[in-house]
């Protein structure tokens, strides 16, 4: 039995790797996605274009403006002399923010009164807008705190913020471990979801069925290449994450591979489910696409699951990607020990076993 | 009907090469000929002879490397739009939109050919009537049978009465009844409308229906003339040989090795022999030799093959199959798809060492029966036993006794020949020394050594077929299932293939085969003819032919008669 | 229109209706994407689980923590000590911890002020940054309440007044849904068109088409027109869902939206046709379309991620991504209005790209088989 399975596995590898197109599909899309996500997917703001409209006649505002100029998050585009210019600048997307300082800014401060500055932002992208307000707010607060200290009127309390696991709040640290999951899923699905359909199209599936191989043997023979390629892909992207993107890896490698193994159970299972239903490669491709898009979007890959409506949150409970991402980020950034990841690992195992069982059942019943 | 000096089609010094995988292959090499008006010209040649390339050049779809091709005096390359509005062209796969209905396909091609709206109803009526598709106007083209598709493809090529009709292998994979219908349509066109037709085919019996044939081989023009003129040199060189003591297969094997023999073929109860000269084969006392009329195929084989080459016998490791008695048994076998019975109440049995043929039009239920026998499809009713078991529930041991070769020559297209052999060997549990030995056997027996590292998808059809058979024989099966094993393969490769099958049968392997070639039906010991899921007749080739009413019927006549009798009943 | 072209267009529509995968890409996929993004993807954080550690409870600490307990942005959980809270944060149960030390009450209102520790889980840095902002907001409120309670003037020298234009409630749906229209139009324009064109080559129908007296321009127009109409149908579906299901405002004019979409669709169709003139089988065409058009429309268009914050080289690449210009127009039309300063330059860029892609397609397509 094992000899036959081995033969089938070798055959699957050969036919994947000998085909130029097949090799391309395994190498080029993951590479491009790694680069695109690694470099372009970022929620950090850099060089936000902004304008200043200052009516202040005093000198105090200069210190505040200097603080903005010194920040790499902002890029001064214009200094306005006229209030009517604010609207067009924002409307035309030339700036994302206008900092407006009133005429009595310096006078108020010097006389010990509370004064205010206005931050006007373009809310077309609400996330960016919120971050711009936060960035600008913290610059203003620092200035405010320093001013208060200089005048000896101390604040009753102050906040000391520390971000654990990602002290500089780098977007890349958040996205890159996610990409390990994303690409592992993508490549495994492509390898498994098309494998039976391809044989059906070429007519070799019948040829396979008349050999003494049993359906279970064929299933294992089809699952193993997906498994091995998935592990290889995960390893490669992990190496790229650590050595190319310099994302810290604090946890244990063993925990990571337990997670990869359990996740691949589900990925291979779903891939083979699609495979046993699809008659043509196109159907297989569409099926994989229709599974992967929701699986990624509803996984917490880019946006938190907690922000979703309750019913959608419940739906994510059957998404293997959801658990895998927690494991990945935990192992990479938090160094989470195995013990604390058990609540993620057992659902992953359950989904994996269930999907493989369904794939096996479909395999037996949809052989012709 | 103009009979001018300009031929309907004229090729002069036409050459065309293709660049594929870094290698330049020659498809046509300095070919010159003319096609006359108002007749059917057949373009005959084996696989990869350059037939399709020639057709595409004539339709202005390809640009020649050198030389020119003119249609009714117009240069097909430079004046392709003008040429395209005067010709009708049916590509190999009929060019139909499968998700459009019959009527919608016709409408589309009428639009593209600019047929005036007011002329359409009458024209469509006429074409559909001619093709017998009138009742199916609303049916999707994809849901038509192969024969109907082919006729619809022809109707689409004819929406605007073309002066030249180009048909690229219109009869591949189509059953004999449909083939006859197509030919009668083509002849009506020629007779009533004076259309010139250029038709390419790999069926040699069709060549005899042509007014003139052009023989292509490896991109070169081999011969041109009427079928008659090509047949004449063969007169007196064809004989029927019978023997009392030798089985027909042993007789064929003996004769094909005899000196002066170009071709020896089983034909019903005798062996048909083509000689190098006009002297009969060396006779032995137990042989009866009588002269036969030559056929076009004889001259084709002679032209291509030349003097006989020595043929060695197949060396199956196992001398004689271990099984005896009845090997395949079917009793009231049924298969339903929804309300539709693809196979109903089919019963027959095949004994050990027999070559049993299953014949029928497309959709007759041959493939369904076949798939049930191989355990690929569960029957809806009835009993079925192969080698004593139902293969669907059989342990892998029982399945190890059968070999299966499908019409698509199901090989892994991106694996090399050697890798395919290795895989199928391992799938049947051959490993270590036995595995290596069997691979060496297959390499030697099927002359595959020179292509062992070639990716099997790049092999020529003949090689693919050999490789597929080798894969099916790796584990020395007792029973061999062949599903249309020779479709699309040229006559020489077919002969080669059947020689091996005969050797296997002699050694006791039971062979079950489906085919469209009526010729090949003659090679079988017994035949079953199927239509609409039922068996119409079972018997030896002679018995089947004896049932036909026409005089001295060919197998095809007998077949067509049986089908027509059933349809009219 | 001539007879050949109408015939080709009618054929294409019949095929679209009958082919389930065309329907899936043209209607089902947009629907799923809109629902997923409309309901599933949200960057609006509310009820963020926040851990509170109060080492020595007092009236002051409970005044402070009340600000957080009452905030709609937070859901608070009390922990006995920092260790437990951090463990809960590591396990993902809470996203941040606020620690009030033993001597909070004593240090309060001392010259140095009492330190309040905010520990963020930085793994999801975007959420971390948002939490930090919210915590600051609550803190400012507390300062003012505290001052008011003690009957003194607020000590904050500079207060921030924030004004967010166009999307004052900061609903992420309001920018995700319009941006998604660009993705959907790319799906229909480029992916579907490239696939159906490749299918004609694969099935051998292109060969039959080419031997008729049809010209190559007619073949190209015969694909462009039906998929243009289909794409506009996809647009209508998306806009209708945006306006009525997701209640995104449309502040600009519908006609400009239609015109800009038509322009983008022609660009996308140009890309689809260009891909199919290079890739003649569906598998390769699909791969190129996904990587070359679909993925960039998602990531590099400014739809979710801010282009200004990308590395310079990536920013340079986004200039050839048509979706980038369309997303800018869409977000402006929906949320801001008819801002010609945004619409005109972006539309001009689309015209340029459309001309480029269609020109290349036209140059690459010959009425031959090779």
Image (cartoon, rainbow, N blue to C red):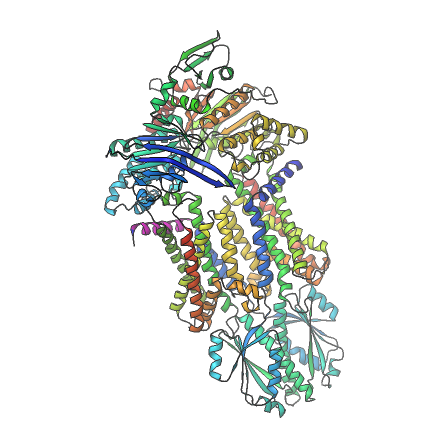
**Which quarter of the rendering shows the C terminus of chain B?**
top left
Q: Main secondary structure of the magenta part?
A: helix
Residue shown at 63%/40% (left/top)?
A10
Q: Is residue C13 magenta?
A: yes
Return the x and y of residue B123 as percentages of the image width and height.
26, 41
Q: Is residue C253 above or below residue A56?
A: above
* Apparent side of residue C231 relative to residue B388 in the rendered image (left or right): left
Residue A105 in view:
yes
Coordinates of residue A318 in the picture (x, y in percent): 59, 55
Q: Nearer the viewer, residue C336 or B64?
A: B64
Q: Which residues are magenta?
A: C3-19
Residue at left offset 50%, top offset 10%: B245
**Where B115 falls versus A248 (above or below)?**
above
Across and down, in percent, residue C118 comes to 69, 74
Q: Is residue C269 visible?
A: no
Which quadrant holds residue B201?
top left
Q: Is residue B91 left or right of residue B512?
A: left
- Give coordinates of residue A323: x percent, y percent: 63, 57
Residue that protrudes farthest toward the top in the picture:
B285
Nearer-the-camera pick, C180 or B202: B202
The residue most toward the bottom is A111
Q: Which quadrant, please, contains the N terminus of chain B?
A: top left
**Count of number-bearing discs:** 0
In the image, residue B8 lies in the stretch drawn in magenta? no
């Amino acid at each position: 039995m094992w000899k036959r399975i081995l033969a089938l596995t070798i055959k699957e590898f050969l036919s994947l790797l000998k085909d130029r197109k097949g090799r391309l599909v395994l190498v080029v899309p993951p590479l491009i996605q790694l680069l695109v996500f690694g470099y372009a997917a970022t929620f950090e703001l850099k060089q936000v274009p902004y304008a200043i409209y200052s009516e202040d006649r005093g000198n105090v505002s200069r210190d505040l403006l200097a603080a903005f100029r010194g920040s790499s998050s902002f890029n001064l585009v214009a200094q306005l002399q006229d209030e009517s210019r604010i609207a067009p600048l924002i409307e035309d997307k030339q700036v994302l923010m206008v900092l407006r300082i009133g005429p009595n800014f310096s006078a108020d401060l010097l006389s010990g009164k509370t004064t205010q500055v206005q931050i006007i932002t373009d809310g077309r992208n609400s996330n960016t807008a919120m971050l711009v307000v936060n960035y600008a707010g913290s610059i203003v607060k620092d200035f405010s705190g320093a001013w208060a200290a200089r005048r000896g009127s101390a604040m009753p309390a102050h906040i000391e913020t520390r971000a654990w696991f990602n002290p500089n709040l780098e977007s890349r640290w958040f996205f890159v471990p996610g990409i390990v999951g994303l690409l592992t899923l993508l490549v495994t699905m492509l390898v498994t979801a098309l494998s039976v359909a391809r044989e059906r199209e070429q007519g070799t599936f019948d040829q396979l069925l008349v050999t003494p191989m049993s359906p279970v043997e064929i299933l294992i023979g089809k699952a193993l290449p997906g498994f091995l390629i998935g592990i290889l892909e995960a390893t490669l992207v992990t190496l790229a994450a650590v050595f190319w993107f310099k994302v810290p890896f604090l946890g244990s490698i063993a925990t990571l591979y337990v997670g990869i193994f359990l996740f691949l159970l589900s990925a291979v299972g779903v891939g083979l489910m699609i495979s046993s239903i699809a008659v043509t490669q196109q159907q297989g491709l569409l099926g994989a696409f229709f599974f992967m898009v929701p699986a990624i979007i509803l996984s917490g890959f880019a946006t938190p699951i907690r922000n979703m409506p309750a019913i959608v949150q419940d739906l994510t409970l059957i998404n293997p990607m959801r658990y895998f991402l927690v494991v990945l980020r935990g192992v990479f950034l938090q160094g989470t020990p195995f013990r604390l990841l058990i609540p993620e690992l057992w659902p992953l195992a359950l989904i994996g076993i269930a999907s493989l069982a369904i794939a096996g059942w479909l395999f037996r019943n949809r052989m012709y | 009907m103009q009979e001018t000096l300009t031929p309907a089609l004229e090729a002069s010094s036409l050459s065309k090469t293709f660049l594929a995988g870094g290698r330049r292959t020659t498809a046509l090499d300095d070919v010159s000929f003319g096609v006359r008006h108002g007749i059917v010209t057949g373009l005959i040649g084996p696989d990869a002879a350059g037939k399709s390339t020639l057709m595409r050049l004539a339709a202005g779809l390809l640009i020649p490397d050198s030389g020119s091709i003119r249609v009714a005096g117009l240069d097909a390359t430079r004046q392709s739009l003008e040429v395209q509005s005067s010709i009708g062209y049916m590509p190999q796969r009929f060019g139909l939109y499968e998700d459009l209905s019959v009527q919608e396909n016709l409408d589309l091609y009428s639009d593209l050919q600019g047929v005036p709206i007011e002329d359409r109803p009458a024209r469509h009526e006429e074409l559909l009537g001619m093709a017998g598709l009138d009742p199916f106007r609303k049916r999707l083209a994809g849901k038509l049978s192969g024969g109907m598709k082919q006729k619809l493809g022809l109707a689409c090529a004819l929406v605007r009465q073309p002066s030249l009709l180009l048909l690229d292998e219109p009869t591949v994979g189509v059953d004999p009844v449909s083939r006859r219908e197509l030919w009668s349509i083509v002849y009506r066109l020629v007779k009533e409308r004076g259309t010139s037709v250029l038709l390419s085919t790999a069926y040699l019996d069709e060549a005899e229906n042509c007014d003139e044939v052009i023989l292509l081989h490896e991109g070169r023009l081999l011969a041109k003339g009427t079928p008659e003129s090509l047949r004449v040199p063969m007169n007196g060189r064809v004989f029927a040989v019978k023997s009392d003591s030798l089985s027909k297969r042993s007789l064929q094997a003996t004769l094909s090795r005899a000196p002066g023999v170009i071709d020896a073929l089983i034909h019903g109860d005798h062996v048909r022999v083509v000689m190098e000269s006009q002297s009969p084969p060396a006779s032995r006392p137990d042989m009866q030799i009588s002269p036969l009329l030559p056929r076009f195929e004889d001259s084709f084989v002679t032209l291509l093959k030349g003097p006989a080459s020595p043929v060695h016998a197949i060396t199956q490791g196992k001398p004689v199959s271990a099984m005896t008695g009845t090997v395949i048994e079917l009793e009231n076998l049924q298969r339903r798809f929804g309300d539709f019975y693809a196979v109903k109440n089919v019963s027959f049995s095949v004994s050990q060492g027999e070559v049993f043929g299953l014949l029928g039009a497309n959709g007759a239920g041959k493939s369904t029966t076949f798939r049930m026998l191989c355990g690929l499809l569960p029957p809806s009713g009835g009993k079925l036993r192969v080698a004593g078991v139902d293969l669907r529930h059989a342990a892998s041991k029982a399945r190890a006794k059968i070999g299966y070769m499908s019409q698509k020559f199901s090989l892994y297209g991106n694996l090399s020949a050697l890798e395919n052999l290795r895989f199928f060997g391992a799938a049947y549990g051959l490993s270590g020394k036995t595995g290596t030995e069997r691979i060496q056997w297959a390499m030697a027996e099927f002359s595959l050594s020179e292509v062992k590292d070639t990716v099997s998808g790049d092999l020529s059809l003949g090689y693919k077929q050999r490789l597929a058979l080798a894969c099916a024989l790796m584990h020395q099966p007792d029973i061999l299932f062949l599903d249309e094993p020779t479709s699309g393969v040229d006559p020489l490769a077919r002969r080669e293939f059947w020689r091996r099958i005969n050797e296997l049968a002699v050694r006791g392997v039971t062979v079950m085969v489906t085919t469209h070639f009526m010729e090949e039906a003659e090679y079988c010991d017994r035949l079953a003819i199927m239509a609409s899921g039922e068996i119409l007749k079972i018997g030896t080739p002679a018995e089947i032919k004896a049932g036909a009413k026409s005089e001295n019927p060919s197998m095809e006549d007998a077949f067509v008669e049986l089908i027509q009798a059933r349809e009219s009943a | 229109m001539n007879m050949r072209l109408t015939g080709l267009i009618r054929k294409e529509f019949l095929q679209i209706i009958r082919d389930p995968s065309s329907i899936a890409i043209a209607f089902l996929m947009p629907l799923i994407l809109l629902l997923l993004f409309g309901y599933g993807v949200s960057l609006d954080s509310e009820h963020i689980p926040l851990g509170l550690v109060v080492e020595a409870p007092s009236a002051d600490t409970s005044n402070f923590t009340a600000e957080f307990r009452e905030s709609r942005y937070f859901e608070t959980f009390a922990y006995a000590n920092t260790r437990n809270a951090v463990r809960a944060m590591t396990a993902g149960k809470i996203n941040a911890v606020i620690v009030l030390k033993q001597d909070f009450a004593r240090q309060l209102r001392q010259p140095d002020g009492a330190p309040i520790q905010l520990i963020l889980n930085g793994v999801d840095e975007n959420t971390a940054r948002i939490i930090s902002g919210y915590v600051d907001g609550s803190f400012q409120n507390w300062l003012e309440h505290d001052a008011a309670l003690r009957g003194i003037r607020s000590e904050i020298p500079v207060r921030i007044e924030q004004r967010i234009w166009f999307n004052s409630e900061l609903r992420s749906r309001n920018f995700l849904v319009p941006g998604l229209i660009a993705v959907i139009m790319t799906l229909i324009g480029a992916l579907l068109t490239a696939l159906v064109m490749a299918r004609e080559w694969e099935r051998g129908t292109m060969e039959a088409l080419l031997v008729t007296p049809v010209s190559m321009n007619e073949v190209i127009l015969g694909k462009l027109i039906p998929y243009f109409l289909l794409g506009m149908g996809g647009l209508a579906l998306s806009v209708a869902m945006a306006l009525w299901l997701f209640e995104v405002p449309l502040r600009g004019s519908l006609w400009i939206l239609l015109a800009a979409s038509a322009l983008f669709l022609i660009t996308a169709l140009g890309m689809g046709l260009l891909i199919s003139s290079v890739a003649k089988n569906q598998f390769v065409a699909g791969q190129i379309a996904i990587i070359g058009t679909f993925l960039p429309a998602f990531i590099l268009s400014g739809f979710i991620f801010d282009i200004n914050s990308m590395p310079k080289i990536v920013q340079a690449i986004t200039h050839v991504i048509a979706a980038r210009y369309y997303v800018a127009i869409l977000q402006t039309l929906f949320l801001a209005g008819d801002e010609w300063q945004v619409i005109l330059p972006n539309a001009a860029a689309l015209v340029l790209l459309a001309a480029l892609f269609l020109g290349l397609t036209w140059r690459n397509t010959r009425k031959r088989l090779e």
